[in-house]
């Protein structure tokens, strides 16, 4: 590359930035600081035409360096951030918020709270309205910290139980309630805005449940899960499900809560519970869905060695085979899988490994393999042989079962 | 001192000088209207160059500053630069005589001083303390935006500190647009007519004076010293006295935010020499530092090449006549002679010699090196045969290291200084606050930079690369012999290489496209590019400039053969 021998202010700062970037990517914080020292004089030039100006660069880069540099202290960091707050009024609340995050990461909860309160009271002409979003976030995080205080106090009370020292408890209790009020107000506000607010929702629901407002909690969770304005969020459904379970709701509502989760995340860990619930249902459609759900979950590598999942599937297919009704269900599910499941789940290598590592797993899988592929398939042959050799009772039972029902796999594979 | 008139009041001849530059009689304290012309060659700090017909000039302004003209500022700059050069070893004559004579001549020719002001050109002063009349109603006064856009806008100075937005808030009492009296007028003048003074031109002045005196410093060295900080250029306004307040448009004139460019300084120097109607410069003879023979010797040493190559460079120089006095000496205004870049020329001669001896086609030079290596095994002489390969490895490694250092220096270059600049009094506090913050941040992060603190600027040195024969690792090639690549023919030593390739068969018209050739790295052998890169680093100029000179030399060298109109891409036999 031909080296330029010309240089002007702008170009030299561009080059300086690229050196900073390289140093930071390689975690050479000293070197990054060295070049940043040379970069800071760009504050004295106006870059109002540029997309990101030097003041923002310096704030972001400087924060990173101070955070990671071994010789830097929290005190220095704070001092730096205070300077950054004065640099750009349009960014003031953002800087405050990020400062708070750093303080939280450093375990300085009280300082974080103070900063949030301070930021909340900030007013600056029309900027206040423009930075409305950041302000809401600040209030939300303060609400979160209020929740955290509330939680601490609640634990204190619970520990003491019905303590003799009523007065001490009373003050704690009062403070607890006040934290609750402050937290509830802010948390409620933020979750109105479409977005991903998992932590806030959980905390808010926790508060509501504690004070017995289950209706409100249910409504909040419903909104969070089903309001189309909010982005699709599997956790929303999980929270709703867990809440309904806590409330002892009917299987019907539990099942309906998990339906969308199955659509979004077929491999979710709750799918086993879902499938089990469906399987026990009286409605045929639900049982059919149960089978579909468990097959879909086992499409994912994460479940390959999960005994619960396999036993859930094994139970269902066994039942169908014994009843001799609805074999076509299995056929339907197996049609799209027969080309790749054998290699994916039922190879000889896996047979060996499963047998070595987890006998229960190999049992369940063998059962399924036998039904889907017949007793002469690699997997079944190996496992059942091993099992009988080891004289384990259930394997002998398994062998008998397969002998009886062997033709089934022919009908399934069609 | 030279004023010999008798005092009107007391008839004595006993004159002193007031602060305003006017003569007063020491006997009776009668102050005259006559002002002193600057006739001797000493520079006085803050001398006000005035014409006799000029009116009264205010002394003190509200903020402690006094009136000053732009050319005074430049005069100060030149003085500082001359002092620095003297400290570097240039003879004092440059500062005391030559430079200031050139400067006075310039002032005269550009009608800024030493002459009657041409009629009709009144100085519309927009200085600090003057309250302007209604700005909008004056149709002749150009808008500030217009003024700012006229001058070559290098940096973004005009957008500093939201200056542009403040122009819309012009009020009657704060029309602060330049600390100098004629700052706005200066930017407005039609550049083509009068060769308006700029910061890069101060270097042209210096170079012109140095050339006149034939001092041992090339233009590339001068510019390198500027960049390294040994010669005041960047932030030179720091040295302006307190009374000379700098603000507004002065910034556009005196603040520099880019390194000086060789071509620009060079071309302006020639324009200047013509403009000043200077006579033929003192002869550049073969005992001068700037003569190609001398410069080649220097560059050969610096490039770690064998001293023996000097014979070859001298032969080339002689053959094409570029060592002739008339070729080398500057005749201002003579448009037919090509302007000589002494440093680039010398470097190009070396490149041509290397091509003559080693071909540099990415093939032959390595073969030749291998054969020299073989011969070296049986070499019983005191000096080893020069092997291109070894030289390449040593020099390339060194070059890469130095280039990397230079690249880091570019990234770390600091442009601002302690003395802050502001466009108007209004944003002074904002500027000062920013400056304070910058200093704080520099301290904070400077401490985290570890022991690798910024080193003090290196001592000025004429040689950037140095090689010592005392090194036992064999990394110095000065004493090596060229016998390994030469052969005897008819009692003469000639190069073993019989071939040569031209950089370009046809030269471009320099006047039309600015260059003799257009260099693209991919079109040429890597060895050739390496050699260009080496000298490009030493001279701090683009490889294409050296390539241009190489083309020029080749065309002179092979002139006869080219005239026979050979086909393209033929390799010439020498």
Image (cartoon, coloured by chain):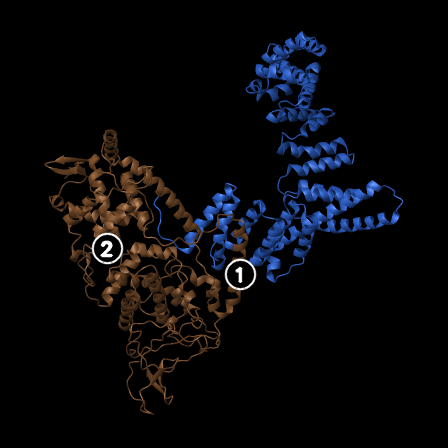
Chain colours: A blue, B brown
Residue A51 in view (yes/no): no
| Nearer-the-camera pick, B30 or A237 | B30
Residue B170 x/y as whole percent: 47, 72
| Nearer-the-camera pick, B491 or A283 | B491
Residue A69 x/y as whole percent: 56, 45
Subunit that carries the residue with mark 2:
B
Q: Is residue B12 left or right of residue A107?
A: left
Marks 2 and 1, how far apart at CA: 47 Å
Can you tell which of label 2 and label 1 is closer to the viewer? Answer: 2
Q: Is residue B155 left or right of residue B342?
A: right
Q: Which residue is mark 1?
A: B436
Say which element carries label 1: helix
Q: Tag 1: Cα neighbours inside 10 Å, few (<14), some, or many (≥20)?
A: few
Residue at left offset 67%, top offset 58%: A121
Subunit that carries the residue with mark 1:
B
| Nearer-the-camera pick, A209 or A407 | A209
Residue at left offset 34%, top offset 59%: B88
Q: Quadrant of the C terminus of chain A?
A: top right
């Amino acid at each position: 590359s031909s080296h330029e021998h010309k240089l002007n202010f702008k170009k030299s700062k561009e080059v300086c930035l690229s050196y900073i970037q390289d140093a930071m990517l390689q975690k050479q914080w000293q070197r990054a600081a060295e070049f940043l020292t040379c970069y800071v004089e760009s504050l004295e030039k106006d870059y109002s035409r540029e997309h990101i100006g030097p003041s923002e660069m310096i704030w972001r880069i400087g924060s990173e360096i101070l955070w990671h540099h071994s010789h830097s202290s929290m005190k220095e960091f704070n001092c730096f951030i205070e300077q950054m707050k004065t640099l750009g009024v349009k960014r003031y609340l953002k800087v405050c918020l990020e400062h708070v995050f750093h303080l939280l990461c450093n375990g300085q909860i009280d300082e974080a709270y103070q900063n949030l309160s301070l930021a909340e009271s900030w007013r600056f002409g029309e900027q206040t309205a423009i930075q409305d979003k950041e302000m809401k976030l600040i209030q939300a995080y303060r609400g979160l910290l209020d929740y955290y205080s509330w939680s601490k106090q609640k634990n204190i009370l619970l520990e003491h139980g019905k303590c003799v020292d009523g007065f001490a408890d009373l003050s704690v209790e009062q403070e607890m309630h006040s934290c609750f009020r402050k937290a509830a107000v802010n948390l409620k506000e933020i979750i109105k805005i479409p977005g991903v607010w998992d932590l806030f929702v959980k905390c808010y629901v926790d508060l509501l449940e504690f004070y017995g407002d289950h209706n409100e909690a249910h409504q909040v969770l419903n909104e969070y899960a089903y309001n189309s304005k909010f982005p699709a969020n599997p956790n929303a459904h999980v929270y709703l499900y867990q809440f309904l379970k806590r409330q002892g709701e009917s299987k019907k509502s539990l099942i309906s809560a998990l339906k969308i989760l199955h659509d979004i995340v077929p491999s979710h860990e709750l799918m086993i519970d879902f499938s089990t619930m469906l399987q026990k249902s009286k409605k045929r459609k639900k049982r059919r869905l149960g089978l579909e759900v468990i097959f879909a979950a086992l499409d994912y590598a994460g479940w390959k060695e999960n005994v619960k999942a396999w036993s859930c599937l094994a139970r269902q297919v066994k039942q169908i085979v014994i009843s001799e009704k609805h074999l076509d269900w299995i056929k339907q599910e197996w049609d799209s899988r027969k080309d790749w499941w054998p290699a994916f789940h039922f190879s000889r290598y896996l047979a060996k490994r499963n047998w070595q590592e987890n006998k229960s797993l190999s049992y369940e899988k063998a059962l399924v393999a036998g039904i889907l592929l017949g007793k002469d398939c690699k997997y079944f042959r190996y496992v059942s042989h091993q099992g009988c050799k080891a004289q384990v009772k259930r394997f002998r039972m398994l062998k008998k079962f397969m002998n009886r029902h062997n033709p089934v796999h022919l009908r399934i594979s069609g | 001192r030279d004023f010999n008139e008798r005092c009107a009041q007391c008839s004595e001849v006993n004159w002193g000088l007031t602060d305003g530059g006017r003569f007063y009689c020491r006997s009776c304290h009668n102050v005259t209207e006559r002002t002193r012309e600057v006739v001797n060659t000493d520079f006085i700090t803050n001398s006000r160059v005035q014409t006799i017909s000029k009116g009264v000039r205010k002394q003190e302004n509200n903020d402690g500053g006094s009136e000053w003209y732009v050319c005074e500022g430049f005069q100060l700059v030149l003085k500082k630069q001359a002092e620095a050069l003297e400290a570097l070893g240039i003879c004092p004559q440059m500062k005391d005589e030559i430079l200031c004579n050139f400067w006075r001549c310039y002032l005269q020719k550009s009608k800024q001083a030493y002459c009657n002001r041409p009629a009709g050109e009144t100085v519309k002063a927009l200085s600090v303390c003057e309250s302007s009349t209604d700005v909008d109603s004056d149709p002749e006064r150009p808008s500030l935006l217009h003024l700012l856009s006229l001058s070559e806008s290098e940096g973004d100075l005009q957008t500093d500190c939201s200056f542009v937005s403040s122009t819309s808030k012009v009020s009657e009492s704060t029309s602060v647009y330049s600390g100098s009296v004629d700052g706005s007028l200066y930017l407005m003048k039609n550049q083509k007519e009068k060769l308006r003074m700029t910061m890069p031109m101060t270097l042209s002045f210096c170079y012109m004076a140095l050339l006149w005196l034939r001092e041992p410093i090339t233009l590339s060295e001068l510019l390198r010293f500027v960049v390294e900080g040994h010669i005041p250029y960047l932030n030179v306004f720091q040295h302006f006295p307190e009374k000379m307040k700098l603000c507004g448009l002065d910034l556009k004139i005196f603040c520099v935010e880019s390194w000086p460019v060789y071509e620009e300084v060079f071309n302006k120097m020639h324009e200047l020499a013509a403009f000043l109607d200077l006579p033929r410069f003192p002869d550049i003879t073969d005992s001068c530092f700037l003569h190609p023979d001398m410069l080649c010797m220097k560059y050969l040493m610096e490039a770690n090449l064998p001293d023996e190559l000097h014979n070859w460079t001298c032969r080339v120089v002689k053959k094409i006549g570029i060592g002739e006095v008339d070729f080398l000496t500057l005749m201002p205004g003579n448009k037919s002679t090509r302007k000589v870049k002494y440093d680039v020329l010398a470097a190009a001669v070396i490149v041509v010699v290397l091509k003559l001896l080693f071909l540099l086609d990415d093939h032959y030079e390595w073969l030749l090196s291998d054969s020299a290596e073989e011969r070296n095994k049986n070499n019983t002489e005191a000096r080893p045969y020069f092997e291109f390969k070894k030289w390449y490895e040593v020099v390339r490694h060194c070059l890469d290291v130095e280039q990397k250092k230079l690249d880091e220096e570019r990234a770390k270059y600091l442009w601002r200084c302690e003395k802050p600049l502001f466009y108007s009094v209004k944003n002074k506090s904002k500027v000062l606050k920013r400056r304070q913050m910058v200093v704080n941040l520099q301290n904070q992060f400077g401490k985290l930079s570890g022991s690798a603190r910024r080193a003090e600027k290196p001592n000025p040195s004429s040689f950037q690369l140095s090689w010592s024969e005392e090194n036992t690792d064999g990394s110095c090639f000065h004493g090596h012999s060229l016998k390994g690549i030469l052969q005897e023919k008819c009692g003469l030593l000639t190069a073993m290489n019989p071939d040569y390739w031209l950089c370009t068969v046809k030269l471009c018209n320099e006047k039309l496209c600015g260059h003799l050739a257009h260099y693209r790295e991919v079109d040429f052998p890597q060895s050739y590019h390496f050699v260009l890169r080496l000298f490009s680093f030493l001279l701090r100029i683009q490889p294409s400039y050296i390539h241009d000179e190489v083309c020029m030399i080749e065309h002179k060298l092979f002139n006869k053969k080219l005239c026979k109109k050979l086909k393209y891409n033929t390799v010439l036999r020498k």
